[in-house]
Amino acid sequence: MWYFCFNFAQKMIMQQLIQEAWANRELLKDSKYGDAVRAVIEEVDKGRLRTASPVEPSTGAKIEWQVNEWVKQAILMYFAIQQMETYVLPPFEFYDKMKLKSGYASLGVRAVPHAVARYGAFLGRNVVLMPSYVNIGAYVDEGSMVDTWATVGSCAQIGKGVHLSGGVGIGGVLEPLQASPVIIEDGCFIGSRCIVVEGVRVEREAVLGANVVLTQSTKIIDVSGAEPIEMKGIVPARSVVIPGSYTKKFPAGEFGVGCALIIGQRKPSTDLKTSLNDALRDFNVSV
């Protein structure tokens, strides 16, 4: 078993084996390829490989992200080679292919019952999991909180010091392989019952008010200036966002369609650890 931190050459060998097995699943019957899949998942579990990686920007530039398709291929093939097992934690019973993470104390992670994280999800130090769910391939960086009944989908990337409030749904993505996962960058505050899916990216220190829904087709409208500015798929850094609607014509008439409204920027005077209510109060908005 190749359970170690890869150097560059070893990573290239692993990538080649994964891509060969992806092209010909019969190769998974060879232990060399099955071991390669398991080795990649171990690296993902420890945070040394990621399904999407930040690319170091030049000074002052925005962070860019690279999707690592071959790592997602390994995750999908891991499902194929794993056998179903029964897990009994009386009075609960589970029947699944995936093991759960363990050793939270050594990881420096607080996991409150009934928090569930699958093996193959990375959790940084000082992460707090309230009763919640983190799926395989996800990356939750240090100091972040996954609050009660929040879910972090497969391959989602959560930055440092992020707060996912109660009931937040962060979507997962394994297929199509080239699709970007949801990315929540450092210092973001995601309000209760928000839904962020389909590879939407929320840049650093942004604040989403309760019930904001973001998909790739959701209009994100900056209404903080004299004229509205529309965008999709990305929330700019330090934006303060609330749910909104706009009127759209249909054959049956005109109806309100949901959107997200950027009402301003997080103020320098606002402490990064402030509550959502405090951030919104700066704009006289109650959510």
Image: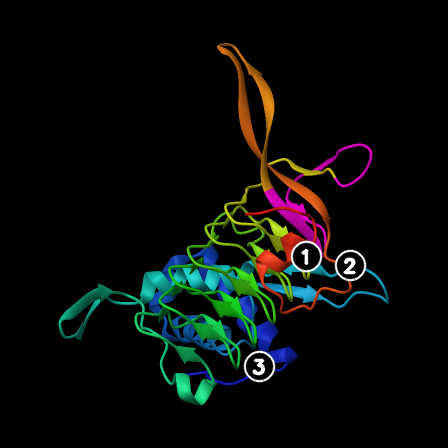
* Viewer-nearest of discs 1 and 3: 1
Dividing the image into 4 quarters, which one contains the N terminus? bottom left
Which residue is labeled 1 in the image?
Answer: 203
Q: Between marks 1 and 2, how big is the CA–CA gap? A: 9 Å
* Sequence-wise first label, 1 or 3: 3
Q: Nearer the viewer, residue 128 or 120?
A: 128
Q: In the rendered structure, does residue 235 fall within the stretch colored magenta?
A: yes
Q: Position of residue 151 (x, y in %)?
A: 42, 59
- Residue span colored magenta: 224-242
In this picture, residue 93 sits left or right of residue 8: left
Q: Which amino acid does label 1 sit on?
A: Glu
Q: Which amino acid does label 2 sit on?
A: Lys
Q: Position of residue 122 (x, y in %)?
A: 49, 73
Residue 65 visible in the shown view: yes
Q: Up-down: is 155 above or below 145?
A: above
Which residue is labeled 3 in the image?
Answer: 6
Which residue is labeled 2 in the image?
Answer: 62
Q: Between marks 2 and 3, how big is the CA–CA gap? A: 28 Å
Residue visible at 35% across and 67% down in the picture? 131
Q: Position of residue 19 (x, y in %)?
A: 52, 61
Q: Label 3: state its secondary structure.
A: loop
Residue visible at 55% across and 41% down in the picture? 215
Q: Which amino acid does label 3 sit on?
A: Phe
